[in-house]
Amino acid sequence: HGDFTGDGSATTITIDANRSVDNIIVVVNGLTLVPTTDYTISGSTLTFIAAPANLAEITVRYLRIS
């Protein structure tokens, strides 16, 4: 998994390539985000619809791809 910290303005983070919204879980300050509603993924870039707050704890958990 990956851990990131929000800065209140950045809307993108770099994640492992070849992932889709179906095989990751994104949690910001303990709240699980909703795929395509709260974020999208293109290649290795995850884009938040709204920038996480300054100092927000962002965790990306990778699910196994079967």
Image (tube, grey):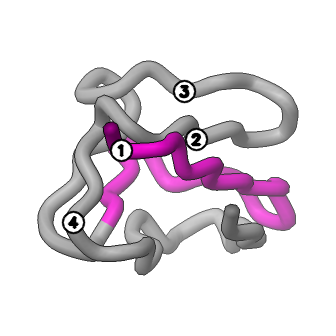
Three-letter amino acid code at disc 2?
A: Val
Query: Percent position (x, y) of residue 14?
Result: 42, 79
Q: Badge 4, how many Cα within 10 Å: few under 14, some, many 20+?
A: few
**Which residue is tagged 1?**
65
Q: Which mark is residue 33?
A: 3
Q: Nearer the viewer, mark 3 or mark 1?
A: 1
User: In this picture, is 59 found above or below 55?
Assistant: above
Say whether disc 3 or disc 4 marks the residue closer to the N-terminus. 4
Q: Nearer the viewer, mark 1 or mark 2?
A: 1
Residue 19, image quadrant: bottom left
Spatial CA span between label 3 and label 2: 6 Å
**Which residue is tagged 4?**
18
**Which residue is tagged 2?**
26
User: In this picture, is 33 found above or below 49?
Assistant: above
SS for dot 3: loop
Say whether disc 1 or disc 2 marks the residue closer to the N-terminus. 2
